Image (cartoon, rainbow, N blue to C red):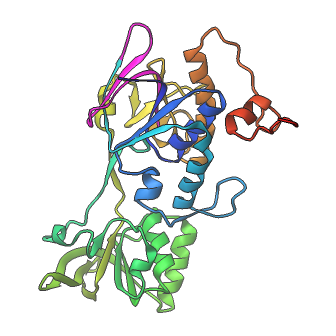
Amino acid sequence: MIKTDVVIVGAGPCGLFQVFELGLLGIKAHLLDSLAQPGGQCTELYPEKPIYDIPALPVCGAQELVDRLLEQIKPFGAEMHFGHEVTEVAKREDGRFDVKTAGGLAFDAGAIVIAGGVGSFQPRRLGLEGVEAFENRQVFYRVQRAADFHDRKLVIFGGGDSALDWTLDLADKAASLTLVHRRAEFRAAPASVAKMRELAAAGKMGFIEGVAQSLLTAGDAITGVVVKGNDGTQHTLEADRLLAFFGLAPKLGPIAEWGLQLEKRALVVDTEKFQTSVPGIFAVGDINTYPGKKKLILSGFHEAALAAFGIQAYLYPGKRQFLQYTTTSPLMHQRLGVAETPAGS
């Protein structure tokens, strides 16, 4: 049994920043994630995707953001446990929690923060016969290294931001590229759609409204794909790499069994301290919902800051709270490890 102030479930950007905000208040945390590494969706789905709305960073790669957060939380020494899905949470009479993982870890925690993004997620797959044999070899549902797709004959499926972002990024780097989407309307940003249509009109890429019908193979390799257009036309496309971005099939998993109030598969929280319907359990990031909720990393950082004060009040109900600034507070400097050594020491 590992005793700790807080267990944080989820090691994406919001979970990592939660470590920082708790650390400033002198609160220790253990971080758990079912994935094999920190970073959540940023690392798993789009590590090279540029992010433009992080304050003071005009542009930041998704993996770069994770790396910066890991550096930022180093002073607080949070222990991290990867490959551990939380399976059981039980509140005790003393207000603390027993937490168990599928990997056999057990915690005695003063409070819990759920920062699990969309929960346990799997990409929606390309529904073609025999596709499983080529997944992670020629059929991909995420881009880990953009360079792996340079000089390749690409067909990209999807109409959301990921599909359009990678279409625009790879259009001038691939040997050939065709985007396939089942309808004329897109879920992606209008500016991205407009740019894609410009490239298609200029002959720099192809675009087909339609759906994948079958794979073309030779031996143990994909050589192309047959696409049926919405007008009934069949298109035979050469391809040695297929990218499918149909979104995620999120699953709350065991979280759904913890007795927390849910609304549309998200955890209902207050906006004072981002506490769930169970006192002592908090939720930040994409996994929570409240009036006006916006699923932005920026919003999750704000939520983590207020949750930290809510957690402090839960752990130490009789303690007065003071807002101290990292710029001027000697205590904050000490916790951050930036305190100046007194002269003569």
Count of number-bearing discs:
0
Left/right of residue 297 with respect to residue 343 in the rendered view: left
The segment highlighted magenta reads: 91-115
The answer to whether residue 185 is seen in the rendering is no
Image position, residue 322 (x, y; %): 74, 21
Image position, residue 257 (x, y; %): 29, 27
Furthest-front residue in view? 344
Left/right of residue 241 with respect to residue 150 in the rendered view: left
The answer to whether residue 246 is seen in the rendering is yes
Image position, residue 215 (x, y; %): 18, 79
- Between 44 and 344, the residue placed more toward the observer is 344
Left/right of residue 321 with respect to residue 7 in the rendered view: right
User: What secondary structure characterizes most of the magenta part?
Assistant: strand
- Between 318 and 299, the residue placed more toward the observer is 318
Query: Is 152 placed above or below 284 here?
Result: below
Query: Is 52 placed above or below 23 here?
Result: below
Q: Quadrant of residue 28?
A: top right
Instruction: Please give the name of the residue rendered at 40% of the width and 90% of the height, measured from the top-left corner.
Output: 175
Query: Is 289 placed above or below 234 here?
Result: above
- Residue 226 colored in magenta in the image: no
Quadrant where the N terminus sits is top left
Instruction: Please give the name of the residue rendered at 28% of the width and 80% of the height, measured from the top-left corner.
Output: 231
Q: Quadrant of residue 198?
A: bottom right
Instruction: Please give the name of the residue rendered at 47% of the width and 64% of the height, measured from the top-left corner.
Output: 161
Image position, residue 162 (x, y; %): 45, 65
Quadrant where the C terminus sits is top right
Instruction: Please give the name of the residue rendered at 58% of the width and 44% of the height, measured from the top-left corner.
Output: 74
